[in-house]
Amino acid sequence: MAERKFITEMAFTLASQGVMITHPKDISKIDDQPEDVSELAKDCHIYLIVKRPRLGFVADSIKWKDGITKGKMYYHQAGERIEIDFLLAGEPNGIIQYSEYPHNTITLVNGEDRIGPLPAHLISLICDDISDKSLRDLEVVYVGMSYGDGNRSAKDRLKSHSTLQQVLADMSADEPDSEALLILVQYAPPISLITFDGRDKSLRMEDDRDVIKDLRKQQELIDGKTEIALAEAGLIKYFKPRYNDKYKNNFPDRAHAITESLYDIDFIAFVVELDTEDIKVRLFSENMKPGFHHIASYDLHDSSIRKSFFDLLESSSSYSAGSHSGPIF
């Protein structure tokens, strides 16, 4: 039967605090965005390459009346053209110009003033309603990190990212009806979760761990680069994206340099969370169903021997980190 090592057990957790979405061709334009967006991009060191059907506007479909704008988009699936409806609150101040076929952008023109081009992939995410909600479900095909000396952001890494270019080339050749998008993720400073369980009378307070000392060791041993590397590895193991290999089937592992400090401090679990509700998309993969908020939980020790951090009420050793992994909504 699994047993606790200490009355006090600790888990190392990382949670996203900012996300943004962009198109690969717009990476170089991020610095031209509003200051809050460009500043967020500088602090994003995790990126996900995601895909979904390629969208275009149905020409001349956008109409407005009584403060409501309605229009149609289309995509192709298995050779079939599928049209969907979208709705925006408000009316455009000007006329709408459609780009040439495949009509993937529109521009608002009012005399000398022009707003745009506005891409279909963006409008589909910011519109107030869309008839096919599955278009806001994006498949994760690659998870990567960029940290370097601490000054290099995911934006800078992606400008010359060979894997991104390979994904785009593969999709162009094999999935011409699919479109790649990029999600950049900023992570908050780590949090140590702590549980106390005094029910096991074989454990004595005088033998318990020194939590303050261990928290200080965390600050000393786990730097920003290691935090980002752990987030990347945890997300790769969780989503098992098509274009990732490392960490896909063997994380966590004592042999990995990035986990060394977790074992030195004697954390019992590691958790990485990712929330994309702010950008109105759910993420999924071949391995994981769609969700806005994903939690990837890992036991760092054999839960059949050392009681899992997540086993607070259950007596069965089968109750482990896996019971606390997955999308929660």
Image (cartoon, rainbow, N blue to C red):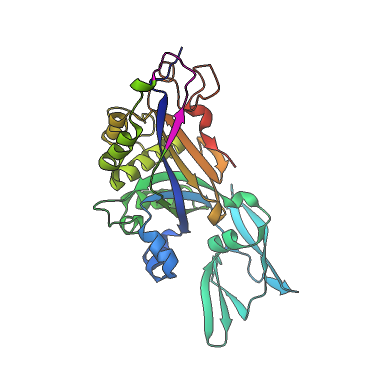
Q: Is residue 254 magenta?
A: no
How far across and how far down the image is residue 262, in percent? 32, 33
144 relative to 299, above or below? below
Query: Can residue 284 be seen?
Result: no
In the image, 252 versus 138, the foreground residue is 252
How far across and how far down the image is residue 105, in percent? 54, 68
How far across and how far down the image is residue 239, in percent? 46, 38
Quadrant in the rendering for residue 125: bottom right
Seen in the image, is 269 located left or right of residue 69? left
Q: Which residue is pictured at 76% across the width and 74% down the height?
A: 66
Q: Which residue is pictured at 62% across the width and 81% down the height?
A: 94
Residue at the extreme front: 206
Residue at the extreme bottom: 111
How far across and how far down the image is residue 58, in percent? 63, 65
Seen in the image, is 203 located left or right of residue 70? left
In the image, 315 versus 301, the foreground residue is 315
Report the magenta residues as a range. 193-204
